[in-house]
Amino acid sequence: MPAYSYKAITPQGVPKEGMLEAASETLAAESLNAQGLIPIRILASKNAAAAGKPATGKRSAGLFGSKKISQHDIMALTQQLATMLKAGLPLDRALGILLEISDKAPVIELVQAIQGSVRSGKRFADALEDSGKFSRFYINMVRAGEAGGSIDDALARLVEYMARAKELRGTVISALIYPAILAFVAVVSIIALLTFVVPQFAQMFKDMGGDLPTITKVVMGTADTLQHYWWAVLGGFLLVLLLVQYILTNEKARTGLDRSLLRWPIVGDLIGKVEMARFSRSLGTLLHNGVPLLGALKIARNTVSNRVMAAAVDESADSLKQGESLTRTLLGKGVFPPYALHMLRVGEETGRMEELLREVADIYDDEVKTSVKQMLALLEPMLILVMAVAILVIIGSVLLPMINMADLVK
């Protein structure tokens, strides 16, 4: 049976560590609950040695350890804090336990700073804002939870939101890894052929004399350029990178790029679904936590990365101030998926906006996964075909003169 190391706290708030055997992580958590313990962290045995080492003195990030707070660290802290607050521990005690069980120096410093601010009389949300490590969305969720007396529920909602966002982001990134590797291998293979293989035949064809086929001339010219003018090719590549950086950092250029991307046949549809899922989930989470619609719109707008779609949300917020319909304004912009907006219009008219926002987010999460699979089904064979044609052209340009020479000899 698998072994798990755990960190938990007693109902009195005393930290406890140990090992237990269970068929799964879920059953391990149930076993701890049966003992009256509140599980904070459960790790499989392969991580047990590292997780169970006691810390001596001030813990550091190590020689190669990261000194930054990752989103994974924020999510783990939120999960642990939500669990302890839900169990009835006061905030100061929960933060103290986080200090005892954390094993990363940056996390410890962050929790110490937050605890110090809370003890000095600041509200929890203000302490988070002062740390500079939390997003505006996160801080406003906590602030709304404080106002409603349910910080634990707000943190639990944040964990759910971050888990969904991480899953969506992971789906897109993992799906693009294989095509990126395939494209890299194709480019390297073609450059290697042009740089090392084709030049070996260039002198032979020159000694042969006669007129070479056009395709051979083109390939030989390309190989010669790579050999003798590689610095110009490299310079051109760097210029392209600088141009891309300029487009991404210049607001006007980035807005133009975002607008054009939305018009692309497959990519535009995928971007619209990703942004709709992200916007719906963030807005629905904020509304559930008691944030007013107008304020929630301004916060959720920051989760939309496409400039054109974000501007549409800004304009809808302005229209809302004048008493106009949110969904009607968004529909008029023509950048968000119409089906999602019609669903939200129903929610707006029936008072079920929060519920339908979460439903829309779930629907478009699933549609993004389907769209990514469809895109890869087209992209992978296209990359393989392009690579095969390019290599075939290079090999053919070398073989064609040799075949012609053999025909002349006969």
Image (cartoon, helix red, strand yellow):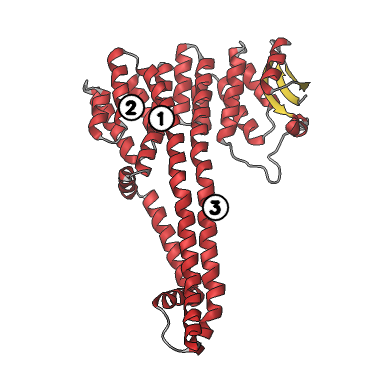
Residue at the image position 68 percent from the left and 46 percent from the top: 64
Residue type, numbered disc 3? Ile
Residue at the image position 70 percent from the left and 38 percent from the top: 60
Cα distance in 3D space between marks 2 and 3: 35 Å
Which of disc 3 and disc 1 is earlier in sequence? 3
SS for callout 3: helix
Q: Which residue is mark 2?
A: 340
Taking the image as shown, residue 395 lies to the left or right of residue 35, namely left
SS for callout 2: helix
Residue 166, given in percent of the width and then of the height, sits at: 52, 33
Q: Which mark is residue 281?
A: none
Residue 323, given in percent of the width and then of the height, sits at: 22, 20
Which of disc 2 and disc 1 is earlier in sequence? 2
SS for callout 1: helix
Which class describes the residues within 10 Å of circle 3: few (<14), some (14-19), or many (20+)? Answer: few
Which of disc 3 and disc 2 is earlier in sequence? 3
Residue 112, given in percent of the width and then of the height, sits at: 62, 28
Residue type, numbered disc 1? Tyr
Q: Quadrant for residue 271, please give it.
A: top left
Nearest to the observer: residue 42 or residue 401? 401
Q: Quadrant of the N terminus?
A: top right
Q: Which residue is mark 1?
A: 364
Look at the numbered discs 1 and 3 and tell me whether their residues touch, using CB distance below 8 Å.
Answer: no
Residue at the image position 53 percent from the left and 20 percent from the top: 155
Residue at the image position 51 percent from the left and 61 percent from the top: 187
Which class describes the residues within 10 Å of circle 2: few (<14), some (14-19), or many (20+)? Answer: many
Q: Which residue is mark 3?
A: 181
